[in-house]
Image (cartoon, helix red, strand yellow):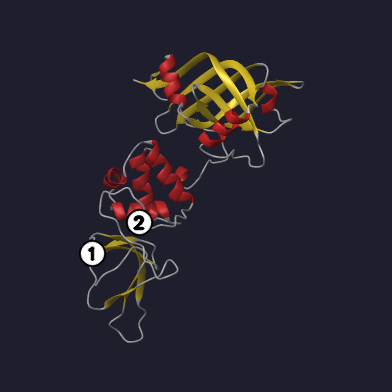
């Protein structure tokens, strides 16, 4: 008997007329596809380790045109178990948090007590893991089941309690640059006729400068030609820790065609707000400060 992740395990009842049991194979423990398998049963949604008996057979599912199956990778790999990726909300959140903490699939699987092939499957497909699996993953990642399910997505971060004995520390300029990274989402403060406006923008760090794309006539575009403030931060809800970095500098638009083309080529993603945003605004840092909240 050989199977791939995504195939169906069917167990026939020994009693004539009695219902059979079936489930999806979500984990394969051997490279050659032989048992045992991790099976998510359709009647309970539980995942159990199964050594199929003589009353069981595999229903192979073709996941792509041409009959290609999902192939299991060896334990410990961080490569996808199949080519087309179509993760669901939980899958994306688990994968994002794992990568943010710089954990391999093997490390997270070991912490959570699940198999690495099943974790790969969960991260890459629209999955609905049971509460026990979600609880184990949340504990291994230092977060909550509610957050892995998307709870609080429409609320600001930092709703938890402050940690015991927190310490507020200044960040060095080098530490500030490290936290800015190469790209992300930050906030630009702009003076408008109606007062000060603070708006989020997708940004890039190019040669030490903050660069973001916007459209002509928008509020972020009004920062060009003036002194601007740009802020980026991160909150670790589980540990009640966080940091923020504030950049002060002169903002200007980039109009030289070669410079615009270079910025376009180095951009990691398009602005999340969508639409045509061809105007690049650059902030040359003149003053860089940052703080972080730690616990003893």
- Category of crowding for the residue at label 2, using alpha-carbon neighbours closer than 10 angstroms: few (below 14), some (14–19), many (at least 20): many
**What's the CA distance linking mark 2 and mark 1?**
14 Å
Split into 4 quadrants, where in the image is the N terminus? bottom left
Q: Quadrant of residue 28?
A: bottom left
Residue lying furthest right: 193
Q: Give the residue displayed 58% in from the left and 21% down from the top.
A: 283
Q: Quadrant of residue 199?
A: top right
Q: How many marks?
A: 2
Q: Position of residue 121 (x, y in %)?
A: 37, 56
Q: Give the residue displayed 38% in from the left and 40% down from the top.
A: 99
Q: Position of residue 249 (x, y in %)?
A: 58, 15
- 37 lies above or below 22: above
Q: Is residue 289 visible?
A: yes
Q: Which mark is residue 12?
A: none
Residue tagged by mark 1? Answer: 32
- Seen from the viewer's position, the closer of residues 75 and 93 is 75
Q: Is residue 168 visible?
A: no
- 84 lies above or below 277: below
- 224 lies above or below 126: above
In the picture, measured across the screen, residue 194 lies left or right of residue 17, that is right
Q: Position of residue 47 (x, y in %)?
A: 33, 60
In the picture, measured across the screen, residue 53 lies left or right of residue 268, that is left
Q: Give the residue displayed 46% in from the left and 45% down from the top.
A: 146
Residue lying furthest front: 258
Task: Say what secondary structure mark 1 lies in.
Answer: loop
- 212 lies above or below 291: below
In the picture, measured across the screen, residue 188 lies left or right of residue 78, that is right
Split into 4 quadrants, where in the image is the C terminus? top left
Q: Which mark is residue 81?
A: 2
Task: Say what secondary structure mark 2 lies in.
Answer: loop
């Amino acid at each position: 008997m050989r199977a791939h992740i995504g195939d169906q395990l069917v167990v026939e009842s020994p009693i004539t007329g009695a219902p059979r049991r079936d489930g999806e194979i979500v984990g394969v423990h051997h490279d050659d596809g032989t048992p045992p398998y991790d099976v998510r049963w359709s009647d309970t949604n539980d995942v159990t380790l199964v050594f199929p008996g003589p009353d069981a057979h595999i229903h192979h599912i073709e996941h792509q045109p041409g009959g290609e199956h999902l192939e299991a990778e060896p334990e410990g790999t961080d490569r996808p178990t199949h080519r087309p990726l179509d993760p669901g909300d939980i899958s994306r959140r688990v994968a994002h948090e794992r990568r943010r903490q710089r954990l391999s699939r093997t490390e997270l699987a070991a912490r959570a007590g699940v198999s690495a092939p099943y974790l790969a499957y969960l991260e890459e497909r629209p999955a609905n893991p049971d509460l026990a699996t979600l609880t184990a993953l949340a504990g291994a990642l230092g977060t909550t089941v509610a957050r892995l399910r998307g709870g609080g997505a429409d609320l600001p971060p930092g709703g938890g309690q402050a940690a015991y004995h927190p310490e507020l520390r200044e960040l060095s300029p080098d530490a500030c640059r490290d936290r800015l990274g190469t790209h992300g989402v930050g906030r630009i403060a702009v003076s408008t006729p109606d007062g000060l406006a603070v708006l989020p923008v997708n940004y890039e760090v190019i040669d030490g400068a903050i660069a973001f794309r916007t459209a002509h006539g928008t509020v972020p575009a009004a920062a060009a030609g003036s002194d601007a403030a740009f802020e980026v931060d991160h909150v670790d809800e589980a540990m009640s820790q966080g940091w923020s970095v504030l950049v002060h500098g002169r903002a200007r638009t980039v109009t030289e065609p070669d410079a615009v083309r270079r910025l376009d080529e180095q951009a990691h993603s398009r602005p999340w707000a969508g639409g045509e945003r061809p105007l690049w605004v650059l902030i040359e840092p003149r003053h860089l400060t940052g703080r972080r909240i730690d616990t003893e």
